[in-house]
Amino acid sequence: MAMQVGVIGCGAISGAYFKHGKDLDAIEYVACADLLPEAAQKRADEFGVGKICTVAELLADDSVDAILNLTIPAAHAEISLRAIDAGKHVYNEKPLGATREEGKQIIDAAKAKGVRVGCAPDTFFGAGHQTARKLIDDGAIGKPVAVVAFMMCRGHESWHPNPEFYYAPGGGPMFDMGPYYLTDMIQLLGPIRRVTGSTAVCIDPRTITHNKSGKEGKQIKVETPDHVAGTIDFASGAVGTIITSFAVSAATLPRIQVYGTDGTLDVPDPNGFDGEVKIKAAGDEDWRTVDPTHPTGYGRAAGLADMALAIEQNRPHRASGDLSYMALEAMQGFLESAESGQAVDITPSDCQPAPLTTDHAFGQFS
């Protein structure tokens, strides 16, 4: 039987979860709730969800097995802890929490209650990232020695209807977009052991220019760094560099590149599931595009479906709480390191998710 899922938070990202979740037999959306009842009604009408209720009613509903928590980052911990207390599994939109302390509360509460915690992003389930993982595991570039990741843009106030939270604590380019890059790097190269960081607030205040938001011209006080640069020491010995920025108009840097002793791998944008993978082995004159080794077409909710199947199959799920907690620790570590001038150690964890097999049927993870 499909896992019965209740959705809390029916904002912009919920549409992608509803849209792609319907293609995955392991989950069924049975109820939704939002602080704005009209937002829940809109999603229910759009995607045929049978029940609209308040958050309290949804958490008290014994027919709901799991909560998909799509609230704003500042509310992730509160909603997750309430769901766990109600005996429900939880799958969060990223990040796991707004702070390391919130993330640990969620992980510890779930272990005590005997329920699962999952967390976005699950984009690493996509063919582009699983193909890259297979190439690394198969030794196509030799021993990985370094990785770089760059997310450079001008910020979200020009297109997002409610961009204020992107510039509040728990937001910023690292907490917003860093989870995609860090999660993919961990699934490719294994756990992180230490980070250092440098940060800046480059543009403050911000002015909303989205002309359909009803907030055009409103100014936003920037309360968290809008440019973050970090270095990463992986337990494997590889060294990483990451820059996330909401203060850059244009850049031609790679999204993710992995450098090995015998070649270089160009990994697609971790904000998406698929995408082109390129490799240039030592001695090659040109880059070569690699055909996907895994099924294409996944979208948001793949990690939730994998968690549902993992519970049924009694195995670890891939988009796990431990994986998202390591990414959260690293993100907070960059900010703390920038303030202290010292490196920040990351809690040891064997959280690198198992790769997907090349022969699995669409949505049937094992």
Image: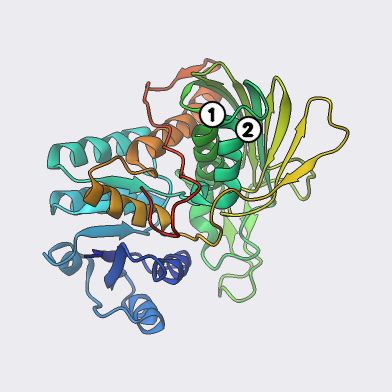
Name which residue lies at 35% across and 41% down. 320
x then y, percent, for residue 83:
20, 54
Q: Based on the displayed image, in which of its 4 quarters is residue 188 positioned? A: top right
Mark 1: secondary structure:
helix
Lower position in the chain sequence, tag 1 or tag 2: 1
Circles 1 and 2: CB distance less than 8 Å? Answer: no
Name which residue lies at 35% across and 80% down. 38
Label 1 neighbour load within 10 Å: few <14, some 14-19, many 20+: many
Residue type at tag 1: Leu
Above or below, 197 against 69 in this view is above
Name the side, left or right, on which 289 lies relative to 133: right
Q: Which mark is residue 95?
A: none
- Residue at image mark 1: 189
Name which residue lies at 54% across and 68% down. 161
x then y, percent, for residue 325:
38, 35
Quarter of the image where the N terminus is located: bottom left
Q: Which mark is residue 242?
A: 2
x then y, percent, for residue 22:
39, 71
Residue type at tag 2: Ile
